[in-house]
Amino acid sequence: MFKRFESVTPRKANFKTREEWLTEFVDFMRPVFEDAGKPLSKVRVACGMTTSRNADGECFHSECSEDGTRDIFISPTESAPVAVRHILFHELCHAALPDDVTHGPEFKKLATTMGLEGRMTSTTPCEELRKALEDFIPKYLGEYPHKKMTRIKQNKQTTRLIKLTCEGCGM
């Protein structure tokens, strides 16, 4: 499936922003998804916080966007290039499926066809996909232009509400 990577001329572009790099990755992967019979529709990708602290990536329904685009966010807490490529590939599997498909049988069928394995909520690439993501993609796109962010642990805010009790009736 990933043999087509070898026929593409490496360009090693110098992207100024991580969003340019992520968008180029999506465009490069479009034919791979078309070959699998699951073409990607409108996809917008950015580096940004996910709704869950535990998620490294997240794909939002097209209904969430005014223009019907599937928005994908890659967490800025992840900077390892191989991990970012894998996370985005996983999220593209979501983007190739209808909005209501989560990590069930339909997702599993596409994900395993595309070379992902393991638990569907936290997939890992098979050997062929891993090799393509680790070896060829950096030659084509260059390195991911991002430095890791860390979340600062914040103390839990105490309540500002003051409990009042009526001494007469107890209310």
Image: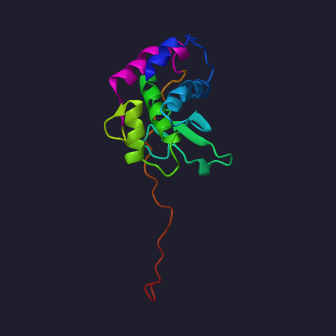
Instruction: Find the magenta span and give its range.
Output: 123-144
Residue 163 visible here: yes
- Main SS, magenta residues: helix
**Above or below 119: residue 131:** above
Q: Is residue 131 magenta?
A: yes
**What is the quadrant of residue 12 in the picture?**
top right
Q: Nearer the viewer, residue 138 or 28?
A: 28
**x then y, percent, for residue 165:** 46, 79
Q: Nearer the viewer, residue 59 or 149?
A: 59
Q: Nearer the viewer, residue 71 or 6?
A: 6
Q: Residue at x 55, y 11 (%)?
A: 10
The quarter in which the N terminus is drawn is top left
- Given the current orientation, which residue lies at the most extreme left position? 118
In the displayed structure, does residue 148 sit left or right of residue 16?
A: left
Q: Residue at x 37, y 47 (%)?
A: 105
**x then y, percent, for residue 37:** 50, 35
Q: Is residue 44 magenta?
A: no
**x then y, percent, for residue 126:** 34, 27
- Given the current orientation, which residue lies at the most extreme bottom position? 169
